[in-house]
Image (tube, rainbow, N blue to C red):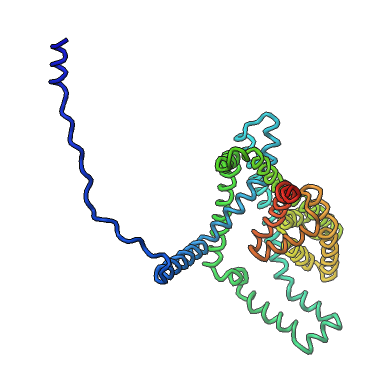
Amino acid sequence: MAISANIKKVTQRPAKPPISPADYGALGVPINRSHPFYFGFIATLGVLTAILFMRALASVSQIFVLILIALFLATGLNPAVEALRRRNLSRASAVTVIFTLVIAFVIFFIFIVIPPVVSQGTQLINRAPQLLRELTNNTAINKLNNQYGIIDTLQIKLKSVTSNGTLFFNSFGGVIGVGRSVLSGFFSFLTVLVLTLYFITSLPQMVDLGLSLVPASRRERVGRLTEAIIGRFGSFVGSQIIIAMLASVFVLILSIVLGLPSPIAIAMIILVCGLIPLIGHFIGISIVTVIALTQSILLALIAFCAYVIYVQVENYLVTPRIMKKTMSVPGAVTIISALIGSSLLGLVGGLLAVPVAAAIILILDEVIIPRARAT
């Protein structure tokens, strides 16, 4: 025992003395936060930070718009993915099926729509001088032309821009403008497509990540509300597709009755235009009227009037009923929210306005109103 105790004493190393902290001097007097200089400095720093932040947002505003569109499309396609998952498909397989259908629709649209659009555009340009001459056969229009020279001015302008075959290039600001527009549109479409694929694939993980920041006592209820809000976004996309398909069928029948060229291509164009809130039908009615104008002025007037009547029926009868049935949003709220959203954020605001209004109504019904009744 004694030997082991001696060995232990020998092997033990002496403890190092504690290292004294460096002396950096005594603490000074705290800054007087009530001093005017301090307040002015902090206020100026806050204003500069806000200005830099707003400029940064303005410089990347197009990217945020693409992200919002992709997120909107992902939440809109999510119900279709969930429907396939209920048929014992994995989420990756369901997303693959949906995206295959979307890409097939885009390819079909390109090959069906672009050739008739080019041919009809060429035909309209070739027939434009004759159509302008036919307008002068009307007594009222001829009288206005004699007083103000409207038709003559249009004829001179049309002759000047089509004499050397540069109408298409002049419309886009020259050859460089055409190339820039095509490349910008292609990369924007590709960016939205890739972001939508990522968002729709990882949507459950994104929701779970957001719910992990919510207190555990409220996580279940917030999760149910989140699923309901995502469901309403999907219902809005489904409703827009139904409304666009109704408009497409109407225009297809109208084109066949009036004998317009390429009625299927016209219907496909209206299907895409119908997905755009508020301004979609303005674009569609312009396209249909211009195509009918390549045949005759009378057909153009008939097509214009018929389309205007259909738009009124859709806006005040069809759309409010579909939105109220699928999203529980009153018709007046649908129209007002779309107008406000378009005024604030343009096309993206028009797309997001109605589902955001539906989400706000859901939160009011499930959270705000019950809490107000309980107090």
Q: Does residue 101 appear left or right of residue 327 in this picture?
A: left
Residue 65 pos. (x, y %): 58, 57
Quick one: 24 or 106, which is closer to the camera? 24
Residue lying farthest to the top in this orientation: 1
Residue 10 lies, with reference to residue 271, above or below; the image says above
Residue 330 pos. (x, y %): 80, 55
Residue at (40%, 69%) from the top-left corner? 35
Total numbered labels: 0
Residue 280 lies, with reference to residue 79, above or below; the image says below
Residue 230 pos. (x, y %): 67, 45
Quick one: 348 or 364, which is closer to the camera? 364
Residue 135 pos. (x, y %): 81, 78
Please tell me in which quadrant of the rendered image residue 1 appears: top left
Quick one: 338 or 216, which is closer to the camera? 216
Residue at (16%, 26%) from the top-left corner? 13
Please tell me in which quadrant of the rendered image residue 319 appears: bottom right
Residue at (75%, 82%) from the top-left corner? 151
Quick one: 246 or 28, which is closer to the camera? 28
Determine if residue 32 is in view. Answer: yes
Q: Does residue 247 appear left or right of residue 105 in this picture?
A: right
Determine if residue 237 is in view. Answer: no
Residue lying farthest to the bottom in this orientation: 147
Please tell me in which quadrant of the rendered image residue 294 appears: bottom right
